[in-house]
């Protein structure tokens, strides 16, 4: 896996250099709507820190950031009204998984019945 690129799009969003449609922010995480949503609700949650992947985040982030981040993910899903109907969490690791921004992030998908096969989501083939 490559090293952290400080000018990736999510790093630039965290620094306020690029806009986003913010859903939530605290000291651990920033959440915003995906610009190319694959479901009625498609929100990205990124930790505040320089982590390439979940493996990097789990190995290098301080415990309070890991706990705070995952609590933020749960709070965001609840605040979006997804708890009762259900939602999907996806975190890609590496280029073969489809990760295109190498800043660890979690996708929250919801608002409709989700197919088991992620390639069946509208626009999934184009996302690659």
Image (cartoon, grey):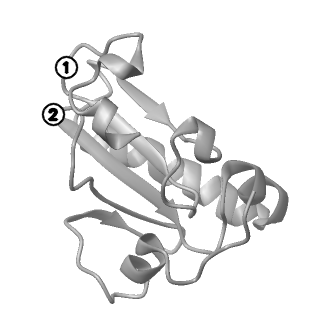
Residue 69 x/y as whole percent:
56, 57
Residue at x 33% of width, y 89% of height: 17
Q: Quadrant of the N terminus?
A: bottom right
Q: Quadrant of the C terminus?
A: top left
Q: Quadrant of residue 107?
A: top left
Nearer to us in this view, 75 or 93: 93
Mark 2 neighbour class, 10 Å CA radius: few under 14, some 14 to 19, many 20 or more: few
Nearer to us in this view, 102 or 44: 102
Asked if the residue under mark 1 is in contact with the one under mark 2, i.e. CB atoms within 8 Å, the reply is: yes
Q: Secondary structure at mark 1?
A: loop
| Residue 3 higher or lower than 96, as above or below | below
Task: Give the Cα distance between marks 2 and 1.
Answer: 7 Å
Q: Secondary structure at mark 2?
A: loop
Residue at x 51% of width, y 75% of height: 27
Q: Is residue 85 left or right of residue 101?
A: left
Residue furthest to the right in view is 59
Residue at x 58% of width, y 57% of height: 104
Q: Is residue 32 left or right of residue 98?
A: left
Residue 10 x/y as whole percent:
44, 71
Q: Of callouts 2 and 1, which one flags the residue occurring earlier in the amino acid sequence?
A: 2
Residue at x 73% of width, y 71% of height: 3
Q: Is residue 93 left or right of residue 30?
A: right
Mark 1 neighbour class, 10 Å CA radius: few under 14, some 14 to 19, many 20 or more: few
Q: Is residue 59 left or right of residue 46?
A: right
Tally of marks? 2
Residue 45 x/y as whole percent:
43, 55
Q: Quadrant of residue 6?
A: bottom right
Disc 2 marks which residue? 40
Disc 1 marks which residue? 112
Q: Find residue 81 and name its label.
A: none
């Amino acid at each position: 896996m490559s090293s952290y690129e400080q000018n990736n799009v999510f790093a630039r969003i965290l620094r306020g250099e690029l806009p986003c449609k913010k859903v939530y922010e605290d000291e651990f995480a920033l959440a915003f709507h995906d610009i190319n949503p694959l479901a009625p609700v498609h929100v990205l949650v990124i930790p505040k820190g320089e982590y390439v992947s979940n493996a990097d985040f789990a190995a290098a982030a301080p415990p309070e950031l890991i706990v705070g981040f995952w609590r933020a993910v749960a709070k965001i899903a609840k605040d979006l009204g997804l708890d009762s109907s259900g939602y999907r969490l996806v975190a890609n690791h590496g280029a073969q998984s489809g990760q295109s921004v190498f800043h660890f992030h979690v996708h929250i998908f919801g608002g409709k019945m989700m197919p088991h096969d992620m390639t069946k989501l509208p626009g999934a083939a184009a996302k690659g």
